Each structure stands twice: as C-alpha cells, then as structure tokens.
C-alpha cells in the first residue's frame, strides 16, 4: 500500500520527466541553438560571393571555416546536428541584385545612351516588367531555410587553432567541447529511457525499492543536459574568438538552446521528488516493521 503523498510525488515526477524528455528531444533535433543576423545584400559582387559560399556550404567538402563564414553572411543557424542558412527561394537569386543593371546595359549596347527622359523611363519600365515576369522580387524576396546535417564522422572531426588551417595545430579544448556537446544529450536521453524501463518493471512488481535509483538516473540526466548547454556556449565563444565576424553581424541564442536549458531543472525536480518518495517510504516502512516487532 502506497501513501497518497508518495503516489502524488511519483505522478508529478513522471509528468516532469516526460516534459523534460520531450523538450530535450526537440532541442537535439532542431537547429536553432545559435543564430546570426546578417545585413542585407548590396551590390552584384557581394551577391556573387554569397552565391559561391552557398554552393560550397551545400555541396562542398566539410570545413569549419567555410561553413562558419557562410553562417555569418547568410543569416545562419547552427545546432547540435544541423547547420542552416537563409536564402531566397528563387533558383537564380544571385542575379536579382544586378537584374536592372543587366537589362539597362543590354539596352544601352543595342541603342546607345538615351537622349531624353522618356527613353530612360521606357528602359526602367521594361526592366521592371521583365523582372516581374521572371518572378524576381528584388526588394523583398521570399526566404527559405536550407539545412545540412553533421554526419557522425564530421562530429568527430578535430578543430584547429585557426579554422580552415590544418597546419595551425589541433585545438584540443574546442575539439572535446564539440564532442561533449553532442554526446552528452544522447547520454541524458539514454539515462531517462533506462530509468523508464526500471520504473515500468517496478510498477509490474508493485515495489518502490528502485525509486531511489530512478531518481539518481534523472539527476544524472539533468546534469548531462546542463553540461551540454555549458559546452555549447563555451565552444561558440571560443569559435568567435578565433574567427572574425563580419561587420554588422549579430549573434543570439535560439529557442532550441532554451528548451535544453529548461529540460535540465525539470529532470532535477523529478529526481528530487523520486528521491524524497523513496527515502520517506523506506523510513516509514522500517518504522512500521520495528513497531510490529515490538
């Protein structure tokens, strides 16, 4: 027979554990841990450069400096398993900034420089109509997010003291911070799954004896999640120290990181309730046993 107080504590701890596990799972599977805000593209030369960065980001070889520079310049977001950039949805977005200039140059090559305002207005109107029918939106293009996942091999790739320069020597601190930040949440989820299996078996056996162990597993899971957030923040800070951020590029924490941060105290609160219920029930059981013996 379980006291109502212990039963209530067990139910609340189960709810907290489920919420924390869902939050952590969503955080691990999404990319909004850290996000950059880049200035708008100005000039055809900058557009061509960003287009090459985008192509290298999506299809090129894995290199920390390459994908970091692309994230800086293209409103990127980076998580534990994903890196994404925000680009216009049109396939020829790199031509948008220079479309009117291209049309004007073409007309000038055919007819020479216009001699009156009417000819200039006609050329501008033709350029606007041509851009409209090609579905180009120069001022406010529709933006889409394109993502690339980190493979398991890439997760274990060493970091260098100068990103992109393999001759600069391995940066051991950044390397192990990166590895910890994606291994620790997996360990945390594994501990919660193990705790759930033990709790299910305890329910089948009608026993509160394993509750203390389940609580300790939740405590370890919460500590692993908290360590994940700390490793991630430390790794991003070190990356910004060895990399040069472009002008007017700002970085901010994303909602995925906050979800992971919230899941840590939820696991710890569940652990506290489980430990309290286990110890209190054990003490009452020993008192009742001693009373019966006496």
Image (cartoon, rainbow, N blue to C red):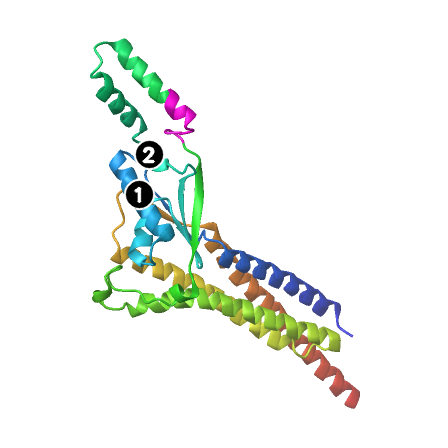
Q: Is residue 206 visible?
A: no
Quarter occupied by residue 209: bottom right
Residue 148's x, y, as percent? Answer: 42, 53
Disc 1 is placed on an element classified as helix
Q: Is residue 137 magenta?
A: yes
Q: Which mark is residue 167?
A: none
Where does the magenta region start and end? 129-140
Horizontal relation, residue 115 to residue 95: left or right: left
Task: For the N terminus, give its image quadrant.
Answer: bottom right
Q: Earlier in the sequence, mark 1 or mark 2?
A: 1
Residue at position x 33%, y 37% from top?
94
Residue at position x 31%, y 36% from top?
41
Q: Is residue 193 magenta?
A: no
Which residue bears the numbered disc 1? 50
Which residue bears the numbered disc 2? 95
4 relative to 145, above or below: below
Horizontal relation, residue 131 to residue 265: left or right: left
208 relative to 132, above or below: below
Task: For the C terminus, give its image quadrant.
Answer: bottom right
Circle 1 residues within 10 Å: few <14, some 14–19, many ≥20: some
Residue 3's x, y, as percent? Answer: 75, 71
Q: Is residue 271 visible?
A: yes
């Amino acid at each position: 027979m379980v006291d109502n107080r212990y039963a209530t504590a067990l139910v609340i701890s189960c709810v907290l554990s489920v919420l924390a596990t869902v939050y952590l799972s969503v955080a691990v599977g999404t990319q909004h841990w850290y996000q950059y805000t880049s200035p708008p593209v100005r000039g055809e030369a900058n557009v061509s450069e960003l287009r090459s960065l985008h192509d290298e980001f999506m299809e090129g070889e894995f290199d920390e400096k390459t994908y970091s520079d692309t994230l800086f310049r293209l409103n990127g977001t980076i998580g534990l398993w994903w890196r994404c950039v925000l680009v216009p949805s049109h396939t020829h977005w790199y031509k948008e900034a220079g479309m009117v200039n291209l049309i004007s140059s073409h007309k000038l090559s055919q007819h020479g420089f216009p001699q009156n305002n009417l000819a200039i207005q006609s050329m501008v109107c033709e350029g606007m109509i041509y851009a409209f029918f090609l579905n180009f939106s120069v001022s406010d293009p529709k933006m889409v997010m394109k993502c690339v996942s980190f493979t398991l091999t890439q997760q274990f790739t060493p970091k260098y003291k100068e990103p992109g320069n393999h001759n600069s020597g391995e940066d051991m601190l950044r390397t192990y911070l990166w590895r910890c930040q994606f291994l620790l949440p997996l360990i945390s989820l594994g501990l919660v799954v193990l705790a759930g299996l033990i709790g299910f078996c305890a329910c089948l056996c009608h026993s509160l004896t394993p509750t203390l162990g389940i609580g300790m597993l939740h405590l370890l899971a919460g500590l692993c999640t908290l360590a994940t957030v700390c490793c991630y923040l430390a790794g991003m800070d070190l990356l910004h120290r060895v990399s040069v951020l472009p002008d007017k590029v700002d970085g901010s924490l994303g909602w995925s990181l906050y979800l992971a941060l919230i899941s840590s105290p939820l696991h710890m609160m569940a652990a506290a309730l489980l430990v309290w219920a286990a110890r209190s029930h054990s003490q009452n059981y020993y008192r009742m046993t001693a009373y019966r013996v006496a």
